[in-house]
Amino acid sequence: MENLKLARRQYAELIRQRADLRSERLVDALSEVAREEYLGPGPWKIMRFAFPLTYEDTPDANPARIYDDLFVALDPSRGLNNGLPSAVTRWLDTMSIQVGEHVVHVGCGTGYYTALIAQMVTASGRVTAIEFAPELADRARSNLRRYSQVEVITGDATKYDPGQADAIFVNAGATHPCRLWIDSLKMSGRLVFPMIRWPEVSAGDGVAGWGVMMRVERRHSGYAARWLSHCAFFPCFGAIDREADRRLGDALARFTLTDARSLRREEHSPDESCLLHGDGYCFSGLECS
């Protein structure tokens, strides 16, 4: 047990360095949450972020094997994994999650990163975890039962209203910012979500699932926005739209979203400041004052 505690502490420091984490509560959560309890019994299929991406088997069921910066398969037949810790925690860190806040986690999977969020908000906060796949939601509900502040919802996160939230973290790709997510943000609320390509005929086209991670923050004057990184995700099917996918493809081809400064929601005609002008949303190069 002491060796496992040491492995978790070393893992937390590794991820702190790789992700350049600022939040001490997030680093503490990495060292305290038992990742193996969210992954099913070992041995596990793991994947390192090195091309070509291929699975390898851990030599045994020692939990210390998965305390590294690597993917762990939840369903290898579908390529469904527990996300890369350095990437997911870097995005979580940008949300500046505080004690006592209400955080919504869309696409919670089996609940590992939800548990990190629960540790960060503490028992005085609240976490609404939403998972579309019933079998994953059931696993998350069981895995997270020790956290009284967590509620796991089985359903479509583009339709389920979680109430007003301080922060929303989306772990499934959308072709556009979902209106419900934006509407659910409290003042100073933060949304971090992946915008991905998901063409109607996606098999083998080389772009499906790839896109950019964006951060949106509600302010009195509007919505500030910024590009965080490139990313790859399974889709959030309620947030996939054919026309939005086409427009996102055009924006990605122009490499303009890295210049995003605001998300405009008011109706306006496209102009030179519009980096991605869609139906009811526009990522703009104009600053949100």
Image (spheres, helix red, strand yellow):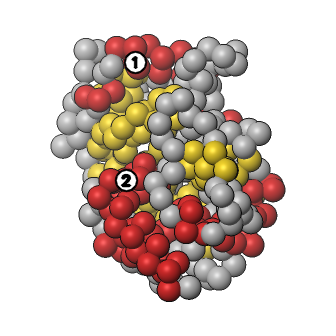
Query: Is the residue under label 1 in contact with that under label 2 (CB below 8 Å)?
Result: no
Please give left or right for residue 46 compared with residue 259 in the image: right
Please give left or right for residue 73 compared with residue 220 in the image: right
Please give left or right for residue 101 compared with residue 22 in the image: right
Would you name the residue on which mark 1 appears? 251
Residue found at x 46% / y 73%: 7
Q: Is residue 152 visible?
A: no
The image shows residue 138 at horizontal and vertical percentages of 78, 64
Residue situated furthest right in the rendering: 135
Classify 33 as above or below 218: below
Which amino acid type corresponds to the residue marked 1 in the rendered image? Answer: Ala
Secondary structure at badge 2 equals: helix
The image shows residue 222 at horizontal and vertical percentages of 30, 44
Q: Residues within 10 Å of mark 1 (few under 14, many from 20)?
A: some
Would you name the residue on which mark 2 appears? 90
Residue found at x 28% / y 15%: 271
Please give left or right for residue 7 compared with residue 136 in the image: left
The image shows residue 204 at horizontal and vertical percentages of 66, 16
Residue found at x 34% / y 67%: 13
Classify 134 as above or below 76: below
The image shows residue 181 at horizontal and vertical percentages of 52, 48
Q: Between marks 2 and 1, how big is the CA–CA gap?
A: 24 Å
Residue situated furthest front in the rendering: 59
Which label sits in the foreground, 2 or 1? 2
Residue found at x 56% / y 49%: 71
Q: Quadrant of the N terminus?
A: bottom right
Q: Residues within 10 Å of mark 2 (few under 14, many from 20)?
A: many
Numbered marks: total: 2
